[in-house]
Amino acid sequence: MTAEWIRWPANVVARFGGEPVAFGGDYNPEQWDEHVWHEDVRLMREAGVNLVTVGVFSWSTLQPEPGRWNFGWLDRVLDLLHAHDIAVDLATATASPPPWLTTRFPEVLPVDRHGRTMAQGGRQAWSPSSLVYREHSLELVERMAGRYGEHPALALWHVSNELGGHNSRCYGEQSAAAFRAWLRERYHDSLDELNAAWTTAAWSQTYSAWTEIQPPRLTFTDSNPTQELDFDRFSSDRLREQLRAEIAVLRRVTPDIPITTNMVLFDAGKNMDYSSWTADLDLVASDHYLRPTPDAHVELSFSADRARGLARGGPWLLMETATGATSWRSVNPAKRPGQLRRDVFAHVARGSDGICFFQWRAARAGAERFHSAMLPHAGAGSRKFREVAALGAELASCSEVLGTRVAADCALLFSEESWWAAERASHPHNGLSYAETALGWHRTLWEAGVTVDVVPPSADLSGYRLIVVPMLYLISDRDAAAVAAAAEAGATVLVSYFSGIVDPLDRVRLGGYPGAFRDLLGVRVEEFAPLAEADSVEIDGVTGPARVSTWHEEIELTDAVAEARYLDGDFAGAPAVTRAARGAGEAWYVGVELPADARARLLDAVAKRPSAGRPADGLEVVTRRSAGHAYLFLINHGDTEVTVQGSGTDLLDGSVHEGKITVPAGGVRVVGSAR
Ligand code: GLA
C-alpha cells in the first residue's frame, strides 16, 4: 500500500484548507434526470460532501449495447462535481454486467450449488470464472481509465463493488474447469498429491483423472472437507484475480491514482479471504451496516478494528454505511436519535479517515428504493438531512486526526480460513459459530475498554502485549510458531477451545488437542466433551463461580497450572482454565465456553488489570495518536451522563476540559491534547 490514501484534487484541498476527512457517499446520477444533478451538487456542498463514489452500477448505461459507448453523461457529472469542489471515487463500473452480455453469453451467469443458473434481473450476475465476463469487464476498465485518468476530479479508483458479495461461489462447468486448473497448479500437476491432500481414501473418493474432479456440488452427505476448503480458497482467489486484472489495467493507464475496493468485513463477507487481497490495494475500504440489535455498536467496532488490522494500522475508509435503515433485512429499523453520530465517530475513533454512505440521494425506484440515504425522500427540509449536514461540519473540524494511529496493544487473531473450516459440518459440536465466538471475545475486550487490532494470524505480532486467539481451528505451523514466539518475547497469549485443531488441509493434528498450541499452552486434551443443550457444569477460580454450557473438556496439565477447575460433572476437580509461563510472557488456555461475566473476570486476571479500571457501561473509549498529540474519543452509548478523567479541547464543540470530561447521555467527544 502506498502512503497516499486519496489523491485529493487541488480545488478540494483549497476549499477545505488542507486534506479533509472524506465525507460523502455513493452517487447514482444515472437514475435521475439531469436537472436533479444541479440540486445534488448544491446540497452536497451544503452538507460538506467532498467525495462521492460514481458509476458503481452504470455499465448498462455506459455501454447500452455491444460496441456502443455512452460516456457523455458521465463526463458532465464529473465536470459538475469538479466545478463544485467535490472529488470522485470512480467505480470501474464492472459490478453488474448489462443484459446484452448475459443474453449473448449465457455462460457468464453464475450457477449455485443446486445447479440452478442465476438469471439477469438482480445484480452481480456473473461467474468469477467467466472468461467472457473478464474480457468485457476489462475492456470497460480500459475505457474508463483512458477517458477519466486525467480528469481533475478523479481522486480514487473503486474496483467493482463488494466483490463476491452475492456471486462468490459458482458451481457451473466453467468454474469446474477453472477449479481443476487451480488444483493442478496447487498440487504440482500430481493427482497423487491431490488425493493425499484431500485424503480421498475416505469414502471411496480417489480420483484417477483430473476431469473427475468437480466443485463440491450437492451430495447426500457432508462432502470432503478439504475439497470444500480448497474450493473456498479457489473461489476467493478467482475474485482476487478479477481484482488484480482490473488493478493491472488501472496501474498501467493511471499509475498515480490510488486504488481501492470495498470489502464487507463481517457477516456477508465470510466468503472472501480479504487478508490475501489487501497487498494489492492502496487503501482498505470497508462497508458496514448495523445489525438490528441493541448492542450493534460492539459489532461495528469489530468490523472497524478488522479494517484497521487489514490496513496494518494505517488509514482506512468507511466506504459505505447507512444514515438510517437498510432495505434488505426482514425488518429494517431506523436509527435511534443520536445513533448515526455515535456510529460515525466510532469508525473515526477506530482509524477511518473518512465516512461515506450508501447513498447520496434516496432512490425513487429500483430494488433499493426504501434504503436510507443522506438526502432522504422527504428532501433537504428533513431531520435526516440536517443531521447529515451537521455531521459534515463536525467531521470537517476533525481533520487534524487524519493520519494519526489508533493506540492498540492487544491483537485478536481472526482468520477467514478458520471461519470457513470451523463452521463446516461433522464437527464435535455443530452449533459453534466461529464468527460469534470471535465477536464474543471482542465484546469482552470492548467492555473492558481494551482497544483491539483484529488481525490475520500471519500479522506481525511483535508489538502486542495481549494476543487473544478465539477458536482458531485451523492454523499453519508457521503462524502457530509466531504466536508461541510472541509469548516467549513477553506477550500474554489467551487461546480458547477448538483452536489449533487442524492443519491447512483440515487434517487433525495428532498427539492430543489443542494440536498446534499444545506445547505453548502446556496442556493436553484427549477427548472433546461438548455439552448437549440441557447440560452444564460449574467451575470456579480466576473466572469466579460460573456455570458453563456448550463445551468443556478434560485438560491434562503438562507444565501449565490450573487457574479454574470444574466443581462438578465428569471432570470434577480437573482444570478448566490454565496458565503456563513462557519466556518473558505467558499462555492461557480456556477449555470451556464461558458466560460473559466469567470471561470479563478472566480477562482482568489475564491482562493483570484492576476491574475498577473499566469504563462506565456503554462508554466507548479509544485513543488516536500522532507524534505530538493524542485524541481521546469518548462515545456514550448509554442513557446517562458519564464523567472521566482527562484534559484537552473538544474538536467538536471547542469546549475546554481540565481534569475531567463529561460526556452527555448518547453523546460524543473528541478531546485533543498535546502528549
Ligand atoms: C451494499 C452495496 C450497495 C448497496 C448497499 C445497501 O453494501 O455495496 O450497493 O446495495 O449494500 O445496504
Image: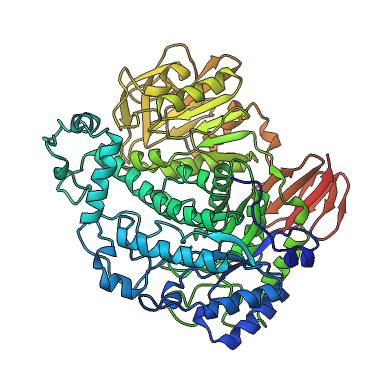
Residue in view at x 25 percent, y 68 percent = 106
Give the quarter of the image for residue 464.
top right
Q: How many badges with numbers are in the image? A: 0
Looking at the image, which is closer to me, 349 or 601?
A: 349
- What kind of colouring is applied to the model shown? rainbow
Q: Position of residue 654 (x, y in %)?
A: 85, 58
Query: Is residue 29 something one can see in this rendering?
Result: no
Identify the image quadrant of residue 27: bottom right
Task: Name the residue located 19 percent from the left edge and 33 percent from the top edge.
Answer: 191
Residue 473 found in image quarter: top left
Q: Quadrant of the C terminus?
A: top right
Could you say where residue 127 lies in the image, as x and y percent from the top left?
31, 59
- Residue 88 seen from this side: yes
- Residue 252 lies, in percent from the top left, at 52, 54
Q: Is residue 333 left or right of residue 572?
A: right
On screen, residue 201 above or below 253: above
In this view, the residue in front, 594 or 547, is 594
Q: Is residue 285 left or right of residue 609?
A: left
Q: Which image quarter holds the N terminus? A: top right
Residue 138 on image: x %, y %? 41, 61
Q: In this picture, is 472 found above or below 251?
A: above
Q: Is residue 45 above or below residue 89?
A: below
Q: Is residue 365 above or below residue 540?
A: below
